Amino acid sequence: MLYRYIVVLFFIGNGLLGGLFLIQPVSAESLVELNAETRLLVALRVGQEELQKFVPPPWQVAPLPGGPLKGANIFIVFIDSYLIQDPQGKPFKGGMSRKVVYAVPSKNMQTSEMVTVVIGGFETNNDNVPGPYKNYAQATIRKEQILKGTNMEAGRGEEFWEVRDNHGALIELRVQYQGALPLRVKSEQKLYSAAEPTFYRIYRQETVGDLVKSIPAGIDRIQSYRFHVAVPKLNNLFNGTEQLVGVATYPLFLRQVFLP
């Protein structure tokens, strides 16, 4: 169960879209957005004390206690939203976007609730800055992707992401991996905002994910990997002491977004 939770943590043809998007919200919830995306997730372990400075009360950083991403306390999620719709199915805020989000598994010290807190990110679509969590910055995001396969083999993938803003921030990720049979999961989660700790959105999603690297589980289908973060506000987190815990790819990621 923990493996399934991790694979769909983040942070998706006609039949699949229709089946998921026709789900109705429960009473008092408002459907605000529909997304179809691909994603790549990098799970890391960074300095706990420094990371806590980004997570306001009543939340406390809570590294994953077990499973294939055990010990991870921050996720960097690379998101390619190739279809964004409003509740009526019309293109919303341009209909597509790319973003990179920093998210932290956290525990509410008053209620013991376990959630994910969004502490920041970069967004290409200026209409979505500072975004729903009030902490996205505008940036230029470039993505390159290559997929190679023969007959029924899972194939090999390669992705390159480059993020640059007008203030000198730079994120670069290049990863090559051997694919395998993915896992398809439905899930529900809440994401809270570090900028506004009481604000959250509810996500109901269906994902197809492949965990290509897990140091705790001894999984390693990565053939090459380079990750570089030079973002001034994150310098104390990414100072050479950060540790890679795992990498997951999501060739299919569908989600409904609700407000409570």
Image: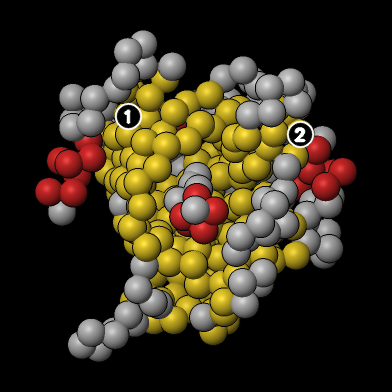
Q: Which mark is residue 256?
A: none
Side (left or right) of 210 relative to 91? right
The residue where tag 1 is placed is 33
Which residue is at 75% across, 39% downward? 61
Kindly state the secondary structure of the residue where label 1 is placed. strand
Which residue is at 51% across, 31% downward? 190
Side (left or right) of 239 relative to 190? right
The residue where tag 2 is placed is 60
Regarding residue 35, the answer to whether it shows in the image is yes
User: Does residue 34 sit above or below 165 in this rendering?
Assistant: above
x then y, percent, for residue 196: 64, 20
Q: How many discs appear? A: 2
Crowding near the residue tagged with mark 2, few <14, some 14–19, many ≥20 C-alpha atoms within 10 Å: many
x then y, percent, for residue 87: 24, 25
x then y, percent, for residue 180: 39, 77
Q: Nearer the viewer, residue 139 or 85?
A: 85
Which residue is at 58% across, 28% downward? 192
